[in-house]
Image (cartoon, rainbow, N blue to C red):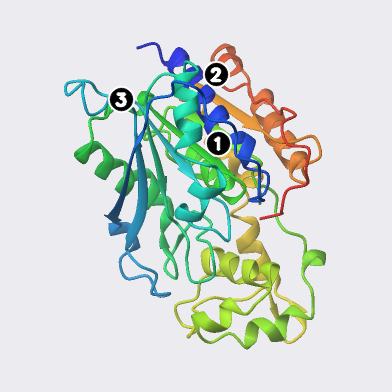
C-alpha cells in the first residue's frame, strides 16, 4: 500500500468525519446523512493502561475507548485495516466528543463519499481536573505512553489492523491537537501520519496570563468535587499543573501551582515552558522526518492560528526533499469561529 495515498485517504476521512464539527467543542449542525451510506459498527470498550497505573491523582487506569469498525469489517474476515487514533480536547471525554462530531454518521458519510475504509479509535483521556494534557506525570499517569503504546498494542491485538506504523494515523483537536503534536514528535515509531487541528499550548505560557484572583480558588481545592466547582480556565490551570509541574510530596493534589503567596513561581513556569512543542520541536526533527505526511488545520479566525503558523514555519525551515514532500503543514481556512485556548 502506498503510504502517501493512504494518508490522503485518512485525511479525507478525518476531514469529512471530524473537522467540520470541531470548532472549540461548540454545538454544530448535524450534517445530512449521505444517501446509501453503509452502517459503521461501534464498540465501546475498556482498555487497561499500564502506563497509568499508580497515578497519584487516582484517575482510572481502565479507560473508555470507542472503536468504529468500517462496513466491510464483519464480512471480509481476512481483510486488515489501517487505523486512525483521534484525541479529544480539554474538558470533554471521548463519549461527549462522539456526540459533538456526530459519529458514526459522519464516518459513514466519509466512507460513502470514497474514503478508504479504516478503523477509527477515540480513547478517553479525561482526568480529575478535566484533562491529561496527553503528557507524562506521576500525578496523572503517563498518558503519552498510554496513547502511543498501550492503546495501539491493545487495538492491534484485538482487531484486524495492519500492525505497521505506516498504517497508523494520529489526529487531535485543541488539547488533542497538542497531544498529537507532542506524541507525534516523540513517537514516530508508533505512527506514520499526523493530522493536527487547532492545536493549543504550543508556546510557553507567559506570567502575565496568570490571574492573581485564581490563587485562592486553586488553594481551596482539596477533592475532585472542589475541582468541579472551578471555572473553565481555573480548572485548566490545575490540569496543566498536574501534568507539567507534578509534586509527589505535595498532597492532596500532588502538584505545584503557578502562583504562591501572590507571586508567580518562575520554576513552575519553567517546567510548563519545557512542555511547549515550539520549545522542543528542534530536538525531534529526525523523528518528524520519519512521517510520510503531516497536516495542520486551523481556522482563519481561530485564536490558535498564530502558533499553528509558527509550527508550520518550523517544519518548512527544516524542509529537505523528503521533509518538503512529507512535512508540508497546511494552515487552512475551515472554521469561521474563535476557538477556546484549551
Mark 3 and mark 1: Cα distance apart in space: 19 Å
Mark 1 and mark 2: Cα distance apart in space: 22 Å
Left or right of 315, for residue 13? left
Mark 3, residue position: 81
Left or right of 43, for residue 112? right
- Point out the frontmost of discs 3 and 2: 3
Measured from the top left, where is residue 93 in percent x and y? Answer: 49, 57
Measured from the top left, where is residue 250 in percent x and y? Answer: 50, 83
Among the two numbered marks 1 and 2 on one chain, the one whose residue lies closer to the N terminus: 1
Q: Residue at x 55, y 36 (%)?
A: 18
Mark 3 and mark 2: Cα distance apart in space: 22 Å
The local crowd at label 2, few if under 14, some if 14 to 19, many if 20 or more residues have their Cα within 10 Å, is many
**As displayed, is residue 244 above or below residue 192?**
below
- Point out the frontmost of discs 3 and 1: 1
Left or right of 111, for residue 222? right
Q: Name the mark on residue 18.
A: 1
The local crowd at label 1, few if under 14, some if 14 to 19, many if 20 or more residues have their Cα within 10 Å, is many
For this rendering, which residue is in front, 247 or 102? 102
Amino acid at each position: 500500500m502506498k503510504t502517501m495515498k493512504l494518508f490522503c485517504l485518512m485525511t479525507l476521512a478525518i476531514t469529512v468525519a471530524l473537522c467540520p464539527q470541531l470548532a472549540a467543542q461548540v454545538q454544530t449542525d448535524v450534517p445530512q446523512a449521505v444517501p446509501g451510506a453503509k452502517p459503521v459498527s461501534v464498540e465501546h470498550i475498556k482498555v487497561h493502561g499500564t502506563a497509568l497505573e499508580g497515578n497519584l491523582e487516582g484517575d482510572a487506569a481502565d479507560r473508555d475507548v470507542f472503536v468504529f469498525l468500517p462496513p466491510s469489517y464483519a464480512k471480509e474476515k481476512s481483510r486488515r485495516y489501517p487505523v486512525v487514533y483521534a484525541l479529544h480536547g480539554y474538558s470533554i471525554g471521548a463519549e461527549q466528543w462522539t456526540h459533538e462530531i456526530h459519529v458514526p454518521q459522519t464516518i459513514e458519510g466519509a466512507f460513502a463519499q470514497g474514503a478508504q475504509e479504516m478503523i477509527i479509535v477515540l480513547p478517553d483521556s479525561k482526568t480529575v481536573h478535566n484533562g491529561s494534557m496527553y503528557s507524562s506525570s506521576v500525578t496523572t499517569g503517563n498518558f503519552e505512553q498510554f496513547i502511543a503504546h498501550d492503546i495501539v498494542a491493545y487495538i492491534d491485538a484485538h482487531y484486524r489492523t495492519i500492525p505497521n506504523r505506516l498504517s497508523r494515523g494520529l489526529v487531535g483537536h485543541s488539547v488533542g491537537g497538542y497531544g498529537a503534536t507532542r506524541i507525534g514528535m516523540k513517537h514516530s515509531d508508533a505512527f506514520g501520519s499526523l493530522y493536527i487541528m487547532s492545536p493549543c499550548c504550543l508556546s510557553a505560557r507567559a506570567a502575565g496570563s496568570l490571574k492573581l484572583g485564581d490563587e485562592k480558588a486553586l488553594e481551596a481545592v482539596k477533592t475532585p468535587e472542589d475541582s468541579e466547582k472551578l471555572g473553565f480556565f481555573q480548572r485548566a490551570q490545575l490540569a496543566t499543573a498536574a501534568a507539567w509541574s507534578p509534586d509527589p510530596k505535595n498532597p492532596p493534589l500532588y502538584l505545584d501551582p503557578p502562583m504562591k503567596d501572590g507571586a508567580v513561581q518562575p520554576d513552575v513556569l519553567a517546567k510548563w515552558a519545557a512542555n511547549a512543542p515550539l520549545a522542543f520541536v528542534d530536538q525531534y526533527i529526525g523523528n518528524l522526518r520519519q512521517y510520510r505526511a503531516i497536516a495542520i488545520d486551523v481556522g482563519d479566525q481561530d485564536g490558535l492560528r498564530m502558533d499553528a503558523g509558527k509550527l508550520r514555519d518550523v517544519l518548512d525551515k527544516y524542509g529537505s526533499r523528503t521533509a518538503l514532500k512529507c512535512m508540508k503543514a497546511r494552515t487552512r481556512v475551515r472554521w469561521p469561529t474563535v476557538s477556546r485556548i484549551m
